[in-house]
Image (cartoon, rainbow, N blue to C red):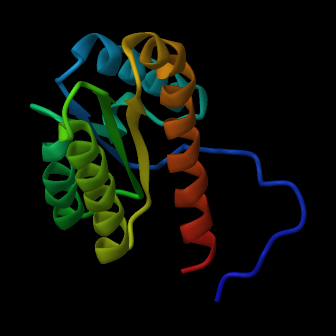
Amino acid sequence: MLHANKGAALPLDGRGLRIGIVQARFNEHITDALAQACDAELAALGVAEGDIDRLSVPGALEVPLALQVLAERGGYQALIALGCIIRGETYHFELVANESGAGVSRVALDYRVPVANAILTTENQAQAVARQTDKGRDAARVAVEMAQLLARHS
């Protein structure tokens, strides 16, 4: 059973972790920036480039299936989902945002592997650009922190 830790989080250390990243190509200029920020932060946390596997998929709806493929392959301490959904004029935004988010969560729960969800859902391009770097870094940090947490409590 996990217990609340009232102290500060342990320093993040990604050495020896295998990480799988799935990146959607839709809104590629945003997802490339997410990936660059994520990669830089993973490197800063000690994750070796050779310990990172990457898959590219057409869009956010395809991300969960690719995450599932990686989870079934096994050997990853964490997975990262990168994508960008920008609101349009139709209901499609809600469908893609809701379904991709639910699918990402389902993979994490079904396979008991942490999945850092950095699929941006924004109202417009400017919001996406404003978030791309911070959210890419956040995804790396979440993946490493959750991998450490599960390693300590499994």
Q: Residue at x 48, y 48 (%)?
A: 16
Residue 93 lies, in percent from the top left, at 25, 37
Left or right: residue 139 compared with residue 30: right
Q: How many marks?
A: 0
Residue 92 lies, in percent from the top left, at 17, 39
Q: Residue at x 23, y 55 (%)?
A: 99
Q: Nearer the viewer, residue 20 or 110?
A: 110
Q: Nearer the viewer, residue 10 or 34?
A: 34
Q: Nearer the viewer, residue 92 or 71?
A: 92
State which quarter of the image contains the C terminus.
bottom right
State which quarter of the image contains the N terminus.
bottom right
| Observer able to see residue 75 | no
Residue 10 lies, in percent from the top left, at 77, 54
| Image position of 117 with respect to 103: above or below | above
Q: Residue at x 25, y 50 (%)?
A: 100
Residue projecting furthest to the bottom: 1
Residue 76, quarter of the rendered image? bottom left
Residue 36, quarter of the rendered image? top left
| Observer able to see residue 104 | yes
Residue 152 lies, in percent from the top left, at 63, 72
| Image position of 114 with respect to 110: above or below | above
Q: Residue at x 30, y 32 (%)?
A: 83
Q: Nearer the viewer, residue 37 or 89?
A: 89
Left or right: residue 88 compared with residue 33: left
| Image position of 21 with respect to 146: above or below | above
Residue projecting furthest to the left: 58
